[in-house]
Amino acid sequence: MVKLNSNIPEGNLAEKWTNHKFKMKLVNPANKRKFDVIVVGTGLAGAGAAATLGELGYKVKAFTYHDSSRRAHSIAAQGGINAAKDYQNDGDSVYRLFYDTIKGGDFRSREANTYRLAEVSNNIIDQCVAQGVPFAREYGGTLANRSFGGAQVSRTFYARGETGQQLLLGAYSSLNRQIKLGNVKIHHRREMLDLVIVDGKAKGIIVRNLLTGEIERYSAQAVVLATGGYSNVFFLSTNAMNSNATAAWRAHKKGATFANPCYTQIHPTCLPVHGEGQSKLVLMSESLRNDGRIWVPDKVGDHRPPSEIPEDERDYYLERRYPSFGNLAPRDISSRSAKYACDDGKGINGGRAVYLDFADAIKRLGEQTIKERYGNLFEMYENITGENPYKVPMKIYPAPHYTMGGLWVDYNLMSNVPGLFVAGEANFSDHGANRLGASALMQGLADGYFIIPYSIGNYFGSEKPDKVDTDRSEFKEAEENIKEITNKLLSINGKQTVDEIHKKLGELLIDKVGMSRSEQGLKQVIKDIKALREEFWKDVKVTGKADELNQNLERAGRVADFLELGELMAVDALNRDESCGAHFREEHQTEDGEAVRNDEEFAYVAAWEYIKPGEWELNKENLEFEFVKFATRSYK
Amino acid sequence: MDEKINLTLNIWRQESANAKGDFEQFKVSVSPHASILEMLDEINNNLEREGKIPIAFESDCREGICGTCGLVVNGHPHGPIPKQATCQLHMRNFKDGETLYIEPFRATPFKLIKDLIVDRSGFDSIQQAGGYISFNTGSAPDANNIPISKQIANLALDAAECIGCGACVAACKNSSAMLFVGAKVSQFALLPQGQPERYDRVEKMVIAMDEAGFGSCTNTYACEAECPKGISVSNIARMNRDYLKSTLISK
Amino acid sequence: MGWLSERLSSSIGKKIIMALTGLLLILFLIIHLLNNLLLYVGPEMFNENVARLEAIKPLVRVIEIALALLFALHIFNALKLWYENKKANPNKYAVDASSENSTVFSRSMVITGVTIGIFLVIHLATFWRTFNFGAHPTDGRHPFYAIIQDAFANPFIALFYFIVMIVLGFHLKHAFQSAFQTMGWRHPKYTPIVEKIGTAIAIIMAVGFASIPIFFYISSLGGK
């Protein structure tokens, strides 16, 4: 049993962060350069943290498995980033952003963390504009906003449909400046394979040089993991091909608890699967729901082309069931509704897809306006599907997109392993059981620019800047362990390829641990995953050698970890005997299919401690709601 | 509905930078809905099953935004369809019976690593030389303190859309990186935030570009034609103008 | 001036030299063509004009030296760029798709340039040398006009001049707008005009210069 202390500061919600910052220990500027920090991952959180730590004077070692730090998957976020600026004068405030996030997360996140996120959101926008991020502007020169799912105010800042790209390039530019100044040393094409713990504290990592296959050791006084989420456990997801859970998972196996793994978000607006060879699912920004209307044919078996289906024979199911939010209902509701419509046989041509129709918006605003708002998304859609969305409604279907679960962290974003910090999607902290649109970019940058740099200073305040020798036995053992795993993978020489097994895992998970889950299904899938994992270690075929560029080996290692993580997701989903946010247990729903939470028994964070493969111990961190009252989420 | 098309593929295989490379031929039958990278996935899956070494190629987001992928298909970086990254190139654009040549980006500064993977770190070194606005986290004024006209913001974003894939270099007969560098220089040259370091920046980035071994621009505009984001060569003109001005005004 | 040579030896610097020398050379070509067109007005006019230039010989010599420098800079830089660019990209793709992403004019600048360079040497060694230092015909015809008449009566010389002047048009078609781009003089409103002017210059130069050997060759046929 580990001891979980959330370290939430005392005081009023609005003063907690300010008070905490004041009470934090500081590091003398002359001493800062004696401290090394390892930052793994160069997305918004990682690049932001590495750059800011460099600016502060720490010596940073940054790692990415990409060929350039600009390629992290943050780059693919399309829609925008929230902030409580209230530039639109529509009644927004830090408190409202906080409340929307808590409510959107279905009361399964920490009040204090979520409030802080809303609080620093405004600094993020200032920061990004100063970096030269070309956000959308009004004619008068001020910043433009759009509205987004789960909110009734217009607080989302955007740069066409490429907000993630522009924000990441901003962070990348700050990082480049620190690299040039010598404060950050960047290590490209390195994949973290283990965390090294010395005297109970995180002191280093083991990485594989992806070009040469060489195993390398790096040490520091603190390690920051900003390695993203684990949606790729489903095989088909909107994540990038290389997104994986290995860094976080190996840290978990070294003692860091993994929190709420069952909270996985299935994004409502993705392109439907085209066929067997599909490698990933493409997301269409949720911002499309601002102007697009979602519908299916009202009659099962109505396979006419959309233009021939008259208005009164269409079922605008979101507008019908949630009149006040309509097409902007939160992601989990939108996704599940699409699933149900298709389960009922109303999907397009009886398959798994629904329409997202812009005909009305084009009529109302003109094609030019729609083009300005979504031009590149429409182009992307046409490229992929060969259909023109200005003329024919888009076809969409939900796909795994974001994982709210992740390594457990306290208020300082430190895991239960001292010295191991976790930022961005890799931690579990701010979104509870469901994340609102345009909040992922906000959290990544909040963690990277404004929280980690402070809290690491606080940690170093009581640490000595002694160099850690990478010849220590802890490093040697970790390296040996990695080599052993690698050799084992290469020597099995079975019959199935890595992708074939990964696909099987994905099918099991999306079916039983996807948009809708049941006790029976979860119990079954746990058995199935265990069996699949055994199959993997007996029958997988990995080609090539250990000491060369070997993409097959890279994927094998990642899938090996997914096979363990997938089981934990099911275990967590089974344990959480309630419906909340993205976690929907069929046993817990109202008559009209709404989720039913159980706040008495389940208002806690489930932090799982690794014992051995297939065995975990549950640690609970109770969620105290001092400032907001539980409310049943209603988007009717 | 799922009729397939048959293609003959000639794919470049080369074990390492110094090894001798050659085309390996594959005959495939592929769904027209698949992307070209999904076709390679399938070939690799078959190779792996047979215990053979899969074709090394890079890709990540598969949405045309990360800039990781980059293959030359029949002489076109990112394939023959304009304004698309390789990952967005769908097989419906090819006819049954066609022969494709799939090669890596070829340019001296992009050293080949393996098969279809090249080293584009030269781009990073150019960005590190000056592709930023120098200011520290926390010191920013309120975002709306700097009004920027919609037109300028749009032009800056047009330039900032560059995904850093290297297709411009691969398309250029001189392996010039001017479109890439011009885009970054332009983004900051257009915005008020970029003014303090404007002329210093262009100087540093051009020096880094030359040091990385990229060629010079002879204005064939092949880069613009092949750019998956359609970055305009007017960004190159802007960089040239700024460079000239920096030459004349620098101390 | 160390800073200037340093700046001008960068990739963009060398291009700026190409653009500036190129534009000045185009100016020279325009004047040259205007001079040549006097051939069509008649032997007297042409000869008179040449004689006028003879009168200010020292000034002409200075301009000639400046021109020689311009040519030297233009050619030297072009060769240097060509060498460096070949080094940056010695590779070819299995399928050549360059015709689909760029114009033949832009891709053939080195070939057209070298052709014009070779022509320049021959041109100087023949016409320019004869005009300045050679023996002038003394059969009562206008001497300078007669040199041209005699030279282009030879079909090989006439054809050679004709072809090279078309090549010159190819070179200029790309050169003019390219120089503007290199100098950074680009604007959505004016660039299309610059492109049209460039095309017009290319055509006028090619047609203007190339017509002369043809005219004299055909005339020589009639005269016999």
Image: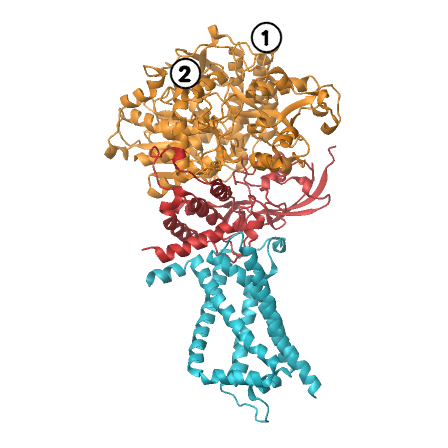
Q: How many marks?
A: 2
Q: Where is the C terminus of chain A found, in terms of image quarters?
A: top right
Res C34 → quadrant: bottom right
Q: CA distance from mark 2 to mark 1?
A: 27 Å
Query: How dense is the environment of label 2, judged by Cα within 10 Å: few (below 14), some, or many (20 and up)?
Result: many
Residue B63 appears at what percent x and percent y? 57, 36
Residue C1 appears at what percent x and percent y? 33, 63
Residue A210 visible in the shown view = no
Residue A589 appears at what percent x and percent y? 58, 9
Q: Is residue A499 left or right of residue A185?
A: right
The hue in which chain B appears in the rendered picture of the protein: red
Instruction: Tell me the subunit letter for badge 1.
Output: A
Q: Residue at x 57, y 27 (%)?
A: A290
Res A410 → quadrant: top left
Res A51 → quadrant: top left
Q: Where is the N terminus of chain A found, in terms of image quarters?
A: top left
Figure coloring: by chain
Query: How dense is the environment of label 1, judged by Cα within 10 Å: few (below 14), some, or many (20 and up)?
Result: few
The residue wearing badge 2 is A111
In the rendered image, what is the letter of the chain coloured cyan? C
Residue A610 visible in the shown view = yes
Whether residues under marks 2 and 1 lie with C-beta atoms below 8 angstroms apart, the answer is no
Q: Is residue C156 left or right of residue A180?
A: right
Among all residues in the image, which is located at the extreme top? A600
Amino acid carrying label 2: it is Glu
Instruction: Tell me the subunit letter for badge 2.
Output: A
Observer-nearest of A13 and A486: A13
Amino acid carrying label 1: it is Thr
Residue A590's label in the rendered image is: 1
The hue in which chain A appears in the rendered picture of the protein: orange
